[in-house]
């Protein structure tokens, strides 16, 4: 199970790609030929630095300890037109949903969304050409060669925005983690006090046909979250790429509908696009309210589907999950956001 300090969603590191190896000036040496033609080979290319999406990673924790990544330079060319060896690339494995920025210019370098997606963080320098490459009918004995190009050097900021299909939005103590624990194999911490969940947790909902979607349990949101109150705002960006929001409104709260409006307002304040995501509503802890009294909690004039669920009795869960699943399937592929909301 994850602990709080393991969830790292922001790191900065320096990357230095390898320089290209120099091309060389060299002359063919053969018996009885005092000075053969030019045969200086090209230098090898410098190693590049890449990030690659690894579906088994969910945090940038292990990247945090890598302050500097330096790829080897290419080797100089050699006689007999031999190219120098290229520097080996370095591949940094990162979770899906990692975005790379140039920390000095603010430029978006790229993001990885699918397993195996690769983005070049620093390109290795090209090897220089040896004197063999410069020979021509008018220049039979070039006595010069190119130096290698320098490798790219950058300060990189990596930011993780989790890729979940569904994000749980609710106040502290709403039963979000309990819900995650009964519908997935995730084992988040559950407790009868607010702010039990301090960092996002992911769980995979799987059905008997093997279809699955990913659901993110986030720290509870309180009013003023968008201005930095509580914990939730720091993690709100992790629902930016969740296609669907699931509002969890606990029935042990006196006014669940007021909660709903407050949560929507927070999302809107944080970023208006968040408030436009498709959503549904689950009234949690419905075991606390007898069925005849439940309908009074329904939010009037609300087009989104509303469910009464209990993680204890499991009431309402199959209906909620099947609805979520069809929404997820309808919105698959819409989670690519190439320009993140803010930097
Ligand atoms: N009666 C009842 N209690 C529930 C239900 N689901 C959760 N609870 C209780 O509600 C309390 C809070 O549950 P959590 O799952 O930790 O709530 P949370 O929304 O994750 O809270 P934070 O992480 O603090 O935001 C716990 O004491 C749970 O046992 C439910 O369906 N019925
Ligand atoms: Mg929780």
Image: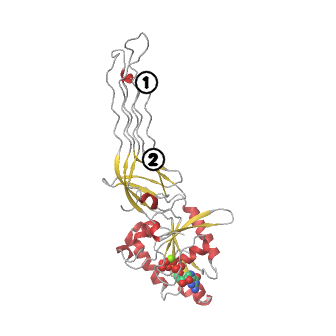
Judging depth in this view, the residue of 299 and 132 nearest the camera is 132
Residue 301, image x, y percentages: 50, 79
SS at badge 1: loop
- Is 218 displayed left or right of 73 in the figure? right
Does the rendering let one see residue 248? no
Q: Say whether mark 2 is within 8 Å of ligand 2.
A: no
- Is 149 displayed left or right of 59 in the figure? left
On the image, which quarter does residue 235 sit in? bottom left
Numbered badge on residue 42: none
Q: Are marks 2 and 1 in contact (CB under 8 Å)?
A: no
Residue 187, image x, y percentages: 57, 73
**Which mark sits nearer the N-terminus, 2 or 1?**
1
SS at badge 2: strand
Q: Residue furthest right?
A: 208
Disc 2 designates what residue?
90
Disc 1 designates what residue?
81
């Amino acid at each position: 199970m994850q602990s709080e300090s393991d969830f790292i969603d922001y790191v900065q590191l320096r990357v230095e790609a390898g320089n290209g190896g120099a091309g060389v000036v060299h002359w063919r040496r053969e018996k009885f030929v005092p000075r053969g033609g030019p045969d200086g080979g090209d230098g090898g290319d410098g190693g590049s630095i890449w990030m690659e999406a690894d579906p088994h990673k969910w945090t940038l924790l292990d990247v945090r300890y890598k302050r500097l990544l330096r790829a080897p330079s290419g080797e100089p060319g050699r006689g007999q037109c031999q190219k120098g060896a290229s520097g080996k690339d370095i591949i940094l494995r990162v979770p899906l949903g990692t975005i790379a920025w140039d920390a000095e210019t603010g430029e978006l370098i790229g993001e990885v969304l699918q397993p195996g997606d690769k983005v070049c963080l620093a390109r290795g320098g090209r090897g220089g050409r040896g004197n063999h490459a410069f020979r021509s009918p008018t220049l039979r004995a070039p006595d010069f060669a190119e130096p290698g190009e320098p490798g790219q050097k950058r300060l990189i900021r990596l930011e993780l925005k989790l890729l979940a299909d569904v994000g749980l939005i609710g106040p502290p103590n709403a039963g979000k983690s309990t819900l995650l624990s009964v519908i997935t194999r995730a084992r988040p911490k559950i407790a009868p006090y607010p702010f039990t969940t301090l960092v996002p947790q992911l769980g995979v909902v799987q059905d008997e046909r093997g279809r699955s979607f990913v659901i993110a349990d986030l720290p509870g949101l309180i009013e003023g979250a968008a201005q930095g109150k509580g914990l939730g705002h720091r993690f709100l960006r992790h629902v930016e790429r969740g296609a669907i929001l699931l509002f969890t409104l606990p029935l042990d709260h006196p006014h669940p509908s007021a909660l709903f409006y407050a949560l929507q307002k927070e999302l809107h304040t944080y970023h208006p696009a968040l408030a436009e995501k498709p959503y549904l509503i689950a009234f949690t802890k419905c075991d606390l309210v007898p069925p005849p009294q439940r309908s009074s909690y329904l939010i009037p004039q609300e087009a989104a589907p509303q469910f009464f669920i209990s993680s204890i009795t499991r009431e309402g869960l199959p209906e909620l999950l099947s609805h979520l699943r069809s929404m997820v399937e309808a919105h698959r592929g819409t989670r690519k956001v190439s320009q993140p909301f803010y930097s």
